[in-house]
Amino acid sequence: MAITGAQRSRLYLGLEPAVGRENAEVILNSLNFSDVEQVASQADMSAVKTDVATLKTDVATLKTDVATLKTDMDFRFSLMMETLDKKFLNIKIWFLVTGAGIALAVVNLYKR
């Protein structure tokens, strides 16, 4: 049977005069006042170990998936940058050609 709050309080009040406040707190905090049903069994611990092993495997798989995703994203980003570089080069060429055409048109207007 688990100890009640009142029983815990009475135990503390009995211990405090004998051992002091700090020692009484240490003693009470060191004692396990839970039901025996709440104590983990070997089967419980085995199940936890299995769950942890499964979790480790899942984390390792996740790390691999993230690394693969990063590699794919790096590759796609590189492709995007190449495409943008080509588009900006085309825009620069277009501006140069257009600017040259406008300059020639202006020169021809003043020649006449």
Image (spheres, helix red, strand yellow):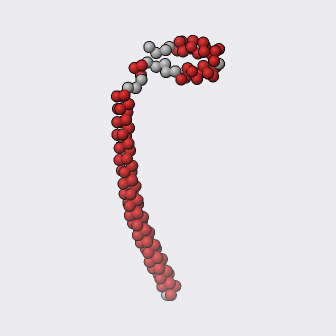
Compared to residue 31, the image places residue 103 above or below, namely: below
Task: Name the one closer to the observer, 41 or 90.
Answer: 41
Residue 108 visible (yes or no): yes
Residue at (38%, 42%) from the top-left corner?
56
Task: Name the one closer to the observer, 88 or 11.
Answer: 11
The spot of residue 89 in percent (x, y) is 43, 72
Residue most extreme to the bottom: 111
**So how many labels did they put on this image?**
0
- Left or right: residue 62 versus residue 109 is left
Residue at (49%, 80%) from the top-left corner?
103
Residue 109 visible (yes or no): no
Task: Name the one closer to the observer, 43 or 7.
Answer: 43
Residue at (40%, 20%) from the top-left corner?
37
The spot of residue 32 in percent (x, y) is 49, 21
The quarter of the image holding the N terminus is top left
Compared to residue 43, the image places residue 5 above or below, namely: above
Task: Name the one closer to the observer, 19 or 108.
Answer: 19
The spot of residue 108 in percent (x, y) is 48, 85
Please identify the quarter of the rendering in which residue 82 is found: bottom left
Residue at (53%, 12%) from the top-left corner?
7
Compared to residue 82, the image places residue 42 above or below, namely: above
The spot of residue 109 in percent (x, y) is 49, 83
- Left or right: residue 14 versus residue 34 is right
Compared to residue 54, the image places residue 83 above or below, namely: below
- Left or right: residue 89 versus residue 57 is right
